[in-house]
């Protein structure tokens, strides 16, 4: 478990797998120089009304922010990203490629099915088949890890019928 490891940084990250049919959106991360899945860190803040309690953003909202950043739109509440994997499946993912500092990431993986494939202005992306995450470059190790976990759990898209945006 992460609590017993000598890693100072343990970021909590929401990964949003955005699917159009069986295709998954890979977005280019300029800082990393690779394509990856939409993801963002979970926000935490000190609530001035309830001192000294640290408040954390709801995971559903963090996953929705990751989708909004790449798609450039809002979502009806009934269509927000839904959890795809048990958080314990992706709790202690270790990674250091971007900055050379080892971190233990706590990933929360959610899915969002979309009909409209347009991306936000300035976002570069490609709709990839799951196998493309293994067979193409440049793809981030984190994206490969998440897609492999989804494959092992039988959770790759297309997902059963439900609200799509």
Image: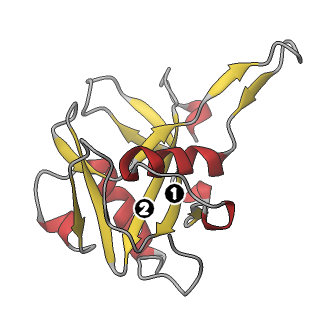
The image position of residue 111, as x and y in percent, is 50, 65
Q: Is residue 142 above or below residue 9?
A: below
The first of marks 1 and 2 along the sequence is: 2
Q: Nearer the viewer, residue 140 or 64?
A: 64
Residue 140 in view in this figure = no
Q: Residue at x 64, y 52 (%)?
A: 60
Give the distance between the C-alpha atoms of the residues marked 1 and 2, in whole angstroms: 7 Å
Dots 1 and 2: beta carbons under 8 Å? yes
Residue 87 percent location from the top left of the image? 60, 55
Q: Secondary structure at mark 1?
A: strand
The label on residue 7 is none
The residue identified by callout 2 is 17
Left or right relative to 117: residue 159: right
Q: Which mark is residue 109?
A: 1
User: What is the crowding at mark 2: few (fewer than 14 residues within 10 Å), some, or many (at least 20)?
Assistant: many
Residue that appears at 15% across and 38% down = 33
**Left or right, 75 with reference to 29:** right
- The front one of 135 and 18 is 18
Does the image show residue 17?
yes
Query: In the displayed structure, does residue 24 sit left or right of residue 154?
Result: left
Q: Nearer the viewer, residue 32 or 3?
A: 32
Q: Nearer the viewer, residue 66 or 52?
A: 66
Mark 1 Cα within 10 Å, few/some/many (few <14, many 20+)? Answer: many
Which of the 4 image quarters holds residue 83?
bottom right
Q: Position of residue 118 (x, y in %)?
A: 31, 61
| Helix, strand or loop at mark 2 | strand
Residue at 49 percent of width and 81 percent of height: 159
Which residue: 27% across, 57% down? Answer: 26
């Amino acid at each position: 478990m992460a609590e017993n490891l000598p890693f100072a940084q343990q970021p909590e990250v929401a990964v949003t797998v955005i699917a159009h049919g069986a295709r998954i959106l890979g977005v280019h991360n300029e800082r990393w120089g690779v394509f990856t899945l939409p993801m963002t860190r979970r926000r935490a803040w000190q609530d001035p009304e309830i001192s000294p309690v640290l408040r954390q953003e709801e995971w559903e909202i963090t996953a929705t922010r990751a989708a909004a950043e790449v798609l450039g739109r809002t979502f009806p509440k009934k269509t927000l990203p839904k959890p795809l994997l048990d958080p314990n499946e992706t709790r202690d993912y270790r990674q250091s490629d971007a900055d050379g500092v080892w971190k233990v990431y706590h990933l929360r993986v959610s899915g969002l099915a979309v009909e409209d494939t347009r991306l936000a202005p300035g976002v570069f992306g490609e709709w990839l088949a799951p196998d493309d995450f293994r067979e193409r470059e440049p793809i981030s190790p984190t994206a490969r890890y998440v897609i492999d976990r989804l494959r092992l759990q039988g959770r790759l898209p297309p997902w059963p019928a439900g609200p799509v945006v």
